[in-house]
Image: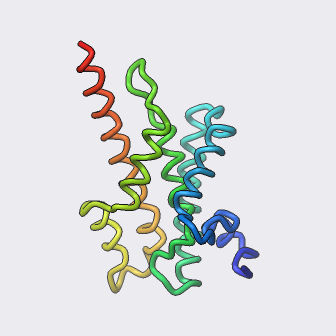
Amino acid sequence: MKLLFNPLHFISFLGGVGFSPIVPGTLATVVAWISYSAFLAQLPALTLYLFLGIGFFIGCLAAHCSAKALKHPDPSAIVIDEVIAFWFLLSLPSYGEVPIPQWLLFGLFRFFDISKPFFIKRVDHYFKQPGKENWVGLGIMLDDLVATACAYLVALVILESVSLSYL
């Protein structure tokens, strides 16, 4: 746990949450959900998106540093990617007058992040190729943003199909 004394490792492992022996990514997503609801949801939109942009940049740097230290292109202990991506997902606009249930977003995000359909896997593997070692942090963060986009789009489709069934 000496790694946690380095601020970048502390960030990428979410203070040690990433070292959980049971589903570290899901646990980090729960922490992200709670922290978003408690703190970030109250921020003005511009401040929130500025915070998320800076967080993404710092997350790339922290993930890169930790992946190099652990000598692995995408260790499961790095969970800052889940946090930033899920915060971004929770910040996206609702579906018209109907708020998107956060439990639905949580389930869809975890589904896409864990299962990594071919298009997410392609983004994930692109940055693990020889010659791309300097971009490993971006790859770790980017595949979760693609999972965010998928979760959001599927949630919109589900809500649209539910609303059409009531017409």
Residue that extends furthest to the top in the rendered view of this protein: 167
**How far across and how far down the image is residue 83, in percent?**
56, 54
At 29% from the left and 25% from the top, the residue drawn is 162
Residue that extends furthest to the front in the rendered view of this protein: 22
At 45% from the left and 36% from the top, the residue drawn is 92
Residue 28, quarter of the rendered image: bottom right
Report whether 26 appears left or right of 20.
left
**How far across and how far down the image is residue 33, in percent?**
58, 45
Name the one closer to the observer, 164 or 55. 164
Q: Quadrant of the N terminus?
A: bottom right
**How far across and how far down the image is residue 93, in percent?**
44, 31
Total marks in image: 0
**How far across and how far down the image is residue 35, in percent?**
66, 45
Name the one closer to the observer, 14 or 19. 19
At 52% from the left and 66% from the top, the residue drawn is 60
Q: Quadrant of the C terminus?
A: top left
Residue 143, quarter of the rendered image: bottom left
At 43% from the left and 53% from the top, the residue drawn is 110
Name the one closer to the observer, 10 or 50. 10
What sort of colour scheme is used for the picture?
A: rainbow
Report whether 167 appears left or right of 34.
left
Report whether 97 appears left or right of 153.
right
